[in-house]
Image (tube, rainbow, N blue to C red):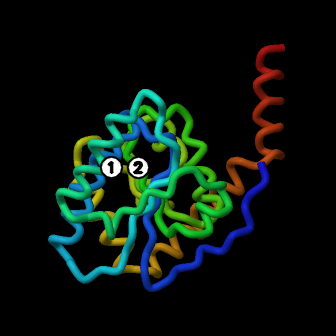
Amino acid sequence: MNYYNIKNNIRKKIVIGTVGAIRELKQIHKIPEIISDILSDQNNLLFEWHIYGKVASDSEEYFKNFVQKLKEHDLEKYCLLKGYCDQKEIFSKINILVHLGKDEAFGRVFIEAMACGIPVIAIDSGGAKEVVKNNKTGFIIKENEHKSFSRKILKLINSKTLITEMGLKGRKDISKRFNSVEHVKSITSIYNTIL
C-alpha cells in the first residue's frame, strides 16, 4: 500500500472529518448532538466538521432529515457538506477523523487517515478496534456514548500537540503493520501452515 505523503497541517481552525457514503449505517445523524455538546462546553472554539461522501440512493430522505436538523439547531456554519472528494483533498484538509458508523467490516478509511498522520475517533466495533490503538493513535468509543465522542473531540481540539503526537504514532503504526513486506510475510505464513 502506498502511503500519502501529506503533512498534517494544523491550523487555528481544527477540521474534523467524516468520510464515507452517506447512509443511516454511518450514523451522521449523531453529529448535530455532538456539535451541540462541544459548543455547550466551549462555545468559542474554532472548528468545522466536514462530511465527505455521496448520498446513497436509498438514503436521500435520511440525508434530508439530517440537513433539516442542522438548520433547526443553527449548526450549518459548523458542519459543511462536501460531497465526494478525492482522498488527497480530504486528508490534506482534516485534522481529526471521526467515524460514527457501526459494523465497519475492515475500516480502510482508518488506515488511510492514520497513514496521513490523522488521529481517529471511532465506535468500538468491526475494523476500528483492529486498526486504532485506543489512547495511542486515536480513541475507541462505545456505541451510543455520544458524550464520549464530544469529550474526546474536545480533548484533541484543545491540544494540537496531542493531535500531532497521536497522528505520528498512527502513521508509524500503520507503516509497520500495513506495508507490502509485512503483507507478503503474513500470506506466506498462512500458505506454509496450510501446506
Name the spot of residue 174 as percent of width and height, x first: 65, 54
Q: Nearer the viewer, residue 78 or 155?
A: 78
Residue sitting at x 29%, y 44%:
142
Q: Secondary structure at mark 2?
A: strand
The answer to whether one can see residue 132 in this image is no
User: Left of 42 or right of it: where is 142?
Assistant: right
Circle 1 crowding by C-alpha within 10 Å: few under 14, some 14–19, many from 20: many
Q: Nearer the viewer, residue 98 or 55?
A: 55
Q: Nearer the viewer, residue 88 or 127?
A: 88
The answer to whether one can see residue 176 in this image is yes
Which mark is on residue 153?
Answer: none
Q: Could you tell me the amino acid type at mark 1?
A: Ile
Please tell me which of labels 2 and 1 falls first in the chain: 2
Residue that mark 1 sits on: 141
Which mark is on residue 122?
Answer: 2
- For the residues labelled 2 and 1, say whether their Cβ atoms are less than 8 Å apart: yes
Residue sitting at x 61%, y 50%:
111
How far apart marks 2 and 1 lie (CA) works out to 6 Å
Name the spot of residue 143 as percent of width and height, x first: 28, 41
Q: Could you tell me the amino acid type at mark 2?
A: Ala
Name the spot of residue 35 as percent of width and height, x first: 26, 63
Outermost bottom residue = 12
